[in-house]
Image: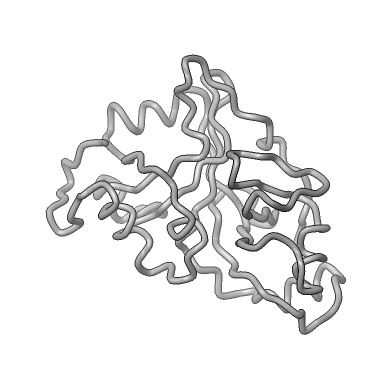
Amino acid sequence: MVFANTPQLAPAVMDNGLSLAGMLLVATPMLGGTAFGQSLIYMCSHTPDGGAMGLVINKRLPRPDFDDLLEQLHITPVPPVRRIGLCAGGPVEEGHGLVLHSGEWSGQDSLRITENVTLTSSMDVLQDIAQGGGPQDALLAMGHAGWSAGQLEQEIFQHDAWMVVPATRELIFGMDHTVKWRRALASINIDPARLSGQAGHA
């Protein structure tokens, strides 16, 4: 288990304001039957030349639980004063932990994605949370999703694999992962039951 820096935490600056950082990707039925079926991904960085990186935020990670993770990282106290949820953040570097959290807290190796959301890859945020402090909202993702330059654009515009949806606090940090995908679609007035394998993008 590793909780360390990842090279994908570079600030996202895309020409003409087209960066998807801070937005949500909602998987369409085109991804049904794949590892990304019904996934909701919070985009952490997106540049025209450097590709994109995001965290799946609606796939619960049953093991390890938060207490087990703290023990592995030698963070005290265990049991902690406060706990946060764990997600399977994606297939890339699944042994690396990243904490997505509200923007009022910042520490070592923190990347501000938007005014309200920050990503931290160092253990100081977990230490504060375990002691009852830290950011108001937080989730811990193990692994992340990544795209090479141009790959995500191709998936969105040519393969209709993703819809782009504005992020809200409830969609990002809500604890009921089972409803996030449907709620994200509902936020743009799309009924999942009406989607087909030929869904377009928003």
Residue at the far top: name it: 16
| Quadrant where the N terminus is found in the figure | bottom right
- Whether residue 60 sits left or right of residue 186 in the image: it is right
Extreme residue in the bottom direction? 79
Q: From the image, which quarter does the C terminus lie in?
A: top left
Q: Is residue 54 above or below residue 74?
A: above
- Which colour style is shown? one colour
Image coordinates of residue 173 in percent, x first then y, are 52, 61
Nearer-the-camera pick, 29 or 81: 81
Kindly indicate the quadrant of the structure image that contains residue 5.
top right
Residue at left 68%, top 31%? Answer: 10
Measured from the top left, where is residue 177 in percent x and y? 43, 67
Q: Quadrant of residue 192?
A: bottom left
Residue at image location 71% in from the left, 35% down from the top? 7
Q: Is residue 108 left or right of residue 28?
A: right
Point out residue 184 in the picture as x, y percentages from the top left corner.
33, 53
Task: Judge by depth and name the residue closer to the eye, 21 or 5.
Answer: 21
Nearer to us in this view, 106 or 35: 106
Which residue is rendered at x = 74% and y = 49% of the image? Answer: 121
Q: Residue furthest left?
A: 194
Up-down relation of residue 121 to residue 175 (above or below): above
Identify which residue, 178 or 135, lies in the foreground: 135
The image position of residue 40, as x and y in percent, is 41, 52
State how many labels appear: 0
Instruction: Give above or below for 180 relative to 71.
Output: above
Horizontal side of 109 relative to 150 (left or right) equals right
